[in-house]
Image (tube, grey):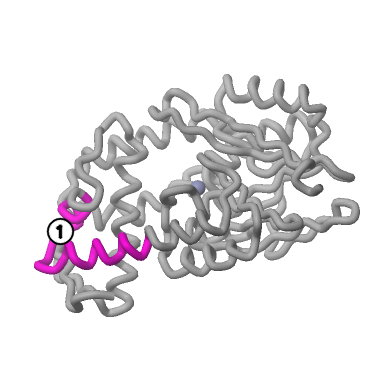
Amino acid sequence: MVNSMIIPITVPFPKEWGRGDSTHSYLIKRELTILIDAGLDSVDNRTYLRRTLKDLDGLNIDYILVTHGHLDHFGLAGYLQRETGAEILVHELDGPALKDYTKAISWYDEVYDFAVEGGYEPQELEKIRSKLLIAIEMMHCPDTFRTFRELELDLGGCTLKSLALPGHTPGSVGYAFGESIFSGDVAIEGSTVIGEFRQEMNSLQKLKSFKNVFTGHRKTPLTITDIESLETHFVNRLEQVLRTVRGGMKLREVVNSIYGEIPEEIFIRSIIPIRQTLSYLKYLEEEGYVVKKGPLWIAVKESL
Ligand SMILES: [Zn+2]
C-alpha cells in the first residue's frame, strides 16, 4: 500500500566523475509531494530530473528531504528549489555542507595528514582534491534550507519520521515511512563508505527493523538479509585489517593489501579505500587491538 506511492528516480553521475554510478531519489506522492534526495548537479541532470518529475506529475514538490550532506544526494536540491519552491530539510549535523559545499568534502582533510604520513604523495592527493572541487564548482548552494534534530511529517494517515543513522556521516538520517525506510548511504549492497565504524554498526542494527531499506545507490530496496551480509562484510574486513597489521604496516601498504592497487581513472575510488581503511584502523586503535607508532599501525591482539 505504502510502497505503491514510492517512485524511484535514478540520477546518473556526470561524466566528470569518471564512473558509471548513479544516485537513487524517491518521489512520494500523498497529501504532500516529497522528494527524498536529489542527485549530482550538472546541466544534463537538471534537464533529466526536471523532465522525469514533470512526466510523473511530480513538479509540485513540498519538501526535498536530504538523507545526508554529500554532493551526490543534495546537489540538485538548490536547482529544484528554485524551480518548484520546495523547502529543503536536512539534519542539523549535516546542515553545514549545504551552506558551504567544501564542507561536503571535509572528510578529505581528515584523511589527508594520515595519508601523507602513511606513504601517499601530497601531489597524488591534491589531484584527487582538485577533481572533487571541479564537481563542487558546477553546483549552486540552495537559497534556503531548514535543519532539524527530529522530523515528523503527516502524509495523510501515515507519518514520515526521521531516524538518526550516523556512521556514514554524523548527520545521516533515514526517513521511515510504514515498513520502509529511505536510508541514503548508511547501507549499500556489498559495502558502504564508513565515517565512524561504531556508529555505522549501530545504525545497521536499527535498519533491521524495516522490511524495505531504500538505498542511495545500487540495489534497492535491501532486505534484512542484505543488511546482515553487510554487517558480516564489515566484521570480516575488520579482522582482515587486524591480521594485515600483525607485523606493523604503513597506511598505504594496508590499503593496497586490502583493496589492491586502485586504477587512477576511478578517482573517487582511490581516496575512499584510504578513508575506509583509516576508519577500521581508528576503531581498532580505540578498542585496544592496534597501536600506532609513528607511521606504523601495529596489531597488539591476535583476533577480535
Ligand atoms: Zn554519501
The residue located at (18%, 72%) in the rendering is 299
Image point (44%, 62%), residue name: 231
Q: Is 86 left or right of 207, judged from the image as shown?
A: right
Q: How many marks?
A: 1
Name the residue beneath numbered marker 1.
250
- Along the line of sight, which residue is nearer the eye, 167 or 157? 157
Part of the protein shown in magenta: 234-255
Please state the horizontal and vertical placement of residue 225, each as a whole percent of the image: 52, 57
Q: Is residue 11 magenta?
A: no
- Residue beneath the point at 84% across and 56% down: 158
Is residue 11 in view from this perspective? yes
From the viewer's perspective, is residue 196 above or below residue 9?
A: below
- Judge left or right: residue 172 versus residue 286: right
Question: Which amino acid type is shown beneath numbered disc 1?
Answer: Lys
Q: Percent from the top left, x then y, of residue 116?
A: 20, 52
From this view, report whether residue 223 is shown above or below residue 140: below
Image quarter for residue 244? bottom left
**Residue with the most extreme left position:** 247
Q: Residue at x 47, y 66 (%)?
A: 201
Q: Secondary structure at mark 1?
A: strand
The location of residue 29, given as percent across then percent down, is: 82, 40
User: Taken as a whole, is the magenta stretch helix, strand or loop?
Assistant: helix
Look at the image and say whether residue 245 sits in the magenta stretch. Answer: yes
